[in-house]
């Protein structure tokens, strides 16, 4: 492609209302154009990137044995009523009536449509398993669309749905998709993590999210650089300390700590580390059986309570923090000075985090306003507690897979795989006849990739002060040729045209900047739009048969002989 | 692809509500599945065909210099209000409100969105011309969706829009698109015609429709088999007869024709041919200036009046048939016996069709109830008339390009190119600065192809009692291998697997029917779904190194040696 024949429009500044870097840069580079809030036109430059992402996704899905189909954007309300989601879904489900006053939705997802198709076509176990997917435009009426294509209203998704005769076979395909998604994001050239996710309201039992790592991500992810372990911080397991509890060396003392209620204040006042302090968090579990439990959760002073983990303790279902009145009722003490010593074990349950269980000679509240205890030890000053994993992991914690230490990063969710089991198949009676001629409900998995969102998140991950930095696999062009004086020097023009033809013949996705612009403008544009490899052709170099090569992220250019340029570029593209 | 790994579901019978052959066959073959009225899922088999069409369209558009982009399906109402179409469009424009009560449409077309994008990005004549297109899902809320994908509500279209600094440049691109569309439909393997079309309400000045020829088409097309001339019957020019008017041989006589008012009755009664009768049609033109014209239009007895042509005669604007009272007022005669002889030329205008002007010794009404005249001749019995092309062409008429005789056929519109001129550009103030720094409104063209409709119309054109007959370029698979006893004979299985691998390696789009079905079932399925080339592998043939080849439309199979099969298939595919 020549820039003179392309629709090439870069902006000096992004619109004022652009919030995140990918949105600003995509607008500046002419990747996208806003049509309405959360609704964008993909301009020719951006569409090249979107299609490259789409094609990699499609190739890998096909290689994995999934079959592509295309479901409609507009879906009849009846199917949503049948699944129950017509009522469950909020206003982000766009509903409308057609000219005959029949109700429809613009699909944000296609579980109902695909399940309806499969129940009509699949009769026998011999037709299973089947995995059908599409790459299709979806609409979700976000209350506050933002971040450009990262949280738009109209967006492109790959959504796949698999159907099985058994949970075992669903798990096999789930594993197949886990591997396929890993291949896809690797081929896209992105730094990513597959993260064990809380399945939340989707109703399935197994689920992984795929996150592109970027500082601007909305999710905290704990991962192990030495292995492929990764999980949302809320779900990552905090192992017990490797070293056993040290023996007690101090006696327990009551110390006046007037006005010192926060752990950090107590630590400073007593001149001890936060790691020597045990904080007690009073909570109440209210299981549906009505048996209320008041409990103290013990955590090390610098650790954070993980409510998801705590709520899994028997009796602590529907966990909430205790009210001040409840604290006074059960402990006869105001909050701020409460602690686990000398507590009535019949009224108050005590659960210690694994880290706390390994502490000795620690400081904790005295259950008396204005006082703390020091030199406290389990088994001597208070009973041995029940021990659970109660906290969020922190950087430096051992990885649960035993392969190193955890780090914490931020990620952008771009893929999600679910074991839906029979949620939709049961609601829509999607059944087959088994080997014995008996009707059985299918097992079902679903697998999504946010195709347009990947473009935004790739730019969140890859950018610098000059613009977009994309992996070669999804850059709008792989190589740009920038001639210095295309319209002035016959030698430069000839060399540029010849190199352009040569690279095209070699199958390289190349753009020749043949605009009559100053070199600075052309360099800035090619950097802004994210071309990973640049060849500059100038008269001086040509006299010695030399061209200038520079990678998008390299500080310095290097001179390469005209004879070697193709080989050099091919090597760079292969390595990318 | 192996059928065992494909989602392959054919039906014995089409649903009862399917109306046309393509709809029935697409449902039976498992190409599509109905999701709601006029809304379909493209199943894996049908999607293969749709994508092949889409890819050919995309390749040729790119080769023609157009640039692909992707506009949103959901469009803000403001743009439609600005162009005036918010009011002009009927209920087939689907309008809805989002959760913030802002109005939107699901786009049936994208003139507004593209013109808005271009007016924001294009500032200078140096950025023009530009041609932007997309292949995108559209929605039109048809009051009565029918014929499957031929007139659905949700459908896939290629729509392109070009912007120019001059009408001349628009015409150049229009010619480029005319040639490009011709290439596209040729590559698709369809019999088609480019047809000069009435631009109607779209507001442009030049327009061609591209029709796939099929008996079930809704439009009548006149075309010349010996050239590329084609036009809607309403617009095709009827030339004057090649032979000059013969000399008068009879004298004019008044003949009683009681109760014979229709031409066919008169011809039978007088025992003359319809080609000897001139019928006079009384019409009234009511131009906006208020000067009413009463006229007799003279046509040969077997010809049909073309009102579009007649209404272009000065004075006959807003043409309508004359009322009985007007006929009596101007001719003092009841309709049925009116004619051009002895008429007051000051009150009644007489316009003769070209064919009539070349007639002599003809029969016409006598302007007296119950009587006709015979042996009538222009210049003797009545003045020479003004002559126009007033009739619809009929089969056998000379082609207007002088290259043969016209035939009439039916067509399905699958493409349409328009010279929109400044209709939208002016409404949305889509302007650029010319060489002199003066602001000018752009000239605009638009170019549509009904991508999903092409699949339906290709099947309307290509089908037989056994199912779908598609050109190789868009068939779901190019070749099928049908082994006789894949699950019983090791030799057959080996030969089938080897041939399958061989064809795949050669880049042939092949399907191996490895289902454990009877040969009859496999043959019927492969014919139903429209695979153009079939290779049957059986034990008996293998013993002699022979395979059986049969083209989808061939009556008999031929035996081909295993050594030659690849060469033979390649030749067939090249020829297709």
Image (spheres, coloured by chain):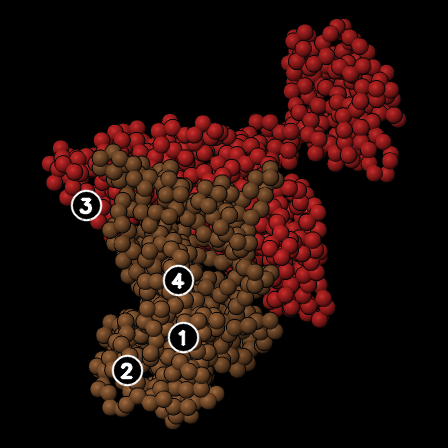
Chain colours: A red, B brown
Question: Residue A90 location, x and y as percent?
Answer: 66, 42
Distance (Cα) linking label 1 and label 2: 17 Å
The residue to which callout 4 is attached is B292
What percent of the width, then of the height, locates residue B232?
A: 37, 69
Chain of the residue on which disc 4 is drawn: B
Give the numbered dot on residue B382: none
Horizontal side of B98 relative to A297 (left or right) equals left
Residue A205 appears in view: no
Measure the alpha-carbon separation of dots 2 and 4: 27 Å
Quarter assignment of residue B425: top left
* Sequence-earlier tag: 1 or 2: 1
> Can you give x and y, in whole percent of width and height, for residue B524 in the image?
51, 79
Badge 4 or badge 1: first in the primary sequence: 4
Q: Which mark is residue B381?
A: 2
C-alpha gap between disc 3 and disc 2: 77 Å
Q: The residue tagged with tag 2: helix, strand or loop?
A: loop
For the residue pair A512 and A366, the one nearer the viewer reads as A512
- Label 3 neighbourhood size at 10 Å, few (<14), some (14-19), many (20+)? some
Residue A497: mark: 3
> Is the residue B550 above or below the residue B66 in the image?
below
Do the residues under discs 1 and 2 have CB atoms within 8 angstroms?
no
Residues at marks 2 and 4 touching, judged by CB atoms closer than 8 Å: no
A152 lies above or below A161: above
Q: Which residue is mark 1?
A: B331
Q: Residue at x 45, y 83 (%)?
A: B369
Q: Residues within 10 Å of mark 4 (few under 14, many from 20)?
A: some
**What is the spatial separation of the Cα atoms under label 4 and label 1, in whole angstroms?**
16 Å
């Amino acid at each position: 492609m020549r820039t003179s024949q392309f629709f090439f429009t870069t902006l000096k500044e992004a619109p004022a209302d652009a919030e995140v870097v990918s949105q600003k840069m995509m607008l500046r580079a002419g990747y996208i154009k806003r049509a309405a809030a959360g609704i964008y036109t993909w301009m020719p430059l951006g569409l090249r990137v979107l299609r490259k992402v789409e094609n990699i996704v499609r190739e890998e899905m096909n290689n994995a044995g999934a079959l592509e189909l295309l479901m409609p954007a507009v879906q009849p309300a009846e199917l949503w009523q049948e699944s129950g989601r017509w009522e469950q879904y909020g206003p982000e489900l766009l509903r409308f009536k057609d000219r005959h006053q029949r109700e429809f939705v613009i699909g944000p997802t296609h579980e109902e449509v695909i399940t309806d198709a499969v129940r009509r076509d699949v009769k026998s176990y011999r037709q299973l398993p089947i995995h059908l997917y599409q790459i299709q435009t979806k609409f979700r009426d976000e209350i506050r669309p933002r971040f450009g294509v990262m949280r738009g209203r109209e967006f492109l998704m790959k959504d796949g749905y698999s159907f099985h005769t058994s949970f075992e076979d669903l798990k096999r395909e789930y594993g197949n998709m886990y591997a396929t998604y890993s291949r896809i994001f690797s081929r896209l050239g992105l730094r990513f993590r597959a993260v064990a996710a809380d399945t939340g309201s989707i109703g399935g039992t197994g689920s992984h999210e795929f996150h592109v790592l970027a500082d601007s991500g909305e999710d905290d992810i704990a991962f192990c650089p030495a292995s492929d372990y990764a999980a949302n911080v809320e779900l990552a397991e905090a192992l017990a300390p490797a070293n056993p509890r040290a023996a007690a060396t101090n006696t327990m003392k009551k110390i006046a700590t007037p006005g010192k209620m926060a752990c950090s204040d107590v630590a400073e006042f007593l001149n001890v580390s936060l790691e020597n302090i045990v904080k007690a968090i009073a909570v109440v579990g209210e299981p549906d059986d009505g048996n209320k439990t008041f409990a103290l959760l013990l955590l090390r002073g610098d650790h954070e309570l993980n409510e998801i983990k705590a709520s899994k303790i028997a009796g602590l279902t529907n966990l909430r923090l205790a009210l001040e009145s409840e604290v006074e009722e059960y402990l006869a003490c105001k909050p701020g000075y409460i602690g686990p010593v000398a507590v009535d074990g019949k009224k108050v349950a005590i659960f210690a985090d694994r880290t706390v269980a390994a502490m000795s000679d620690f400081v904790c509240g005295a259950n008396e306003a204005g006082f703390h205890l020091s030199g406290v030890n389990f088994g001597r000053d208070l009973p041995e507690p029940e021990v659970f994993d109660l906290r969020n992991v922190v950087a430096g914690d051992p990885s649960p897979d035993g392969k190193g230490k955890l780090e914490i990063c931020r990620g952008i969710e771009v893929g999600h795989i679910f074991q839906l089991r029979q949620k939709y198949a049961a609601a829509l009676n999607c059944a087959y006849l088994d080997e014995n001629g008996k009707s059985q409900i299918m097992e079902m998995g679903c697998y999504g990739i946010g195709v347009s969102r990947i473009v935004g998140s790739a730019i969140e991950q890859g950018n610098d002060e000059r613009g977009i930095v994309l992996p070669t696999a999804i850059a709008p062009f792989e190589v740009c040729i920038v001639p210095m004086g295309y319209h002035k020097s016959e030698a430069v023009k000839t060399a540029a045209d010849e190199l352009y033809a040569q690279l095209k013949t070699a199958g390289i996705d190349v753009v020749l900047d043949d605009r009559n612009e100053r070199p600075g403008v052309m360099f800035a544009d090619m950097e802004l739009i994210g071309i990973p490899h640049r060849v500059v052709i100038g008269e001086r170099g040509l006299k010695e048969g030399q061209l200038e090569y520079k990678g998008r992220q390299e500080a310095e250019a290097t001179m390469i002989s005209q004879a070697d340029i193709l080989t050099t570029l091919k090597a760079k593209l292969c390595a990318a």
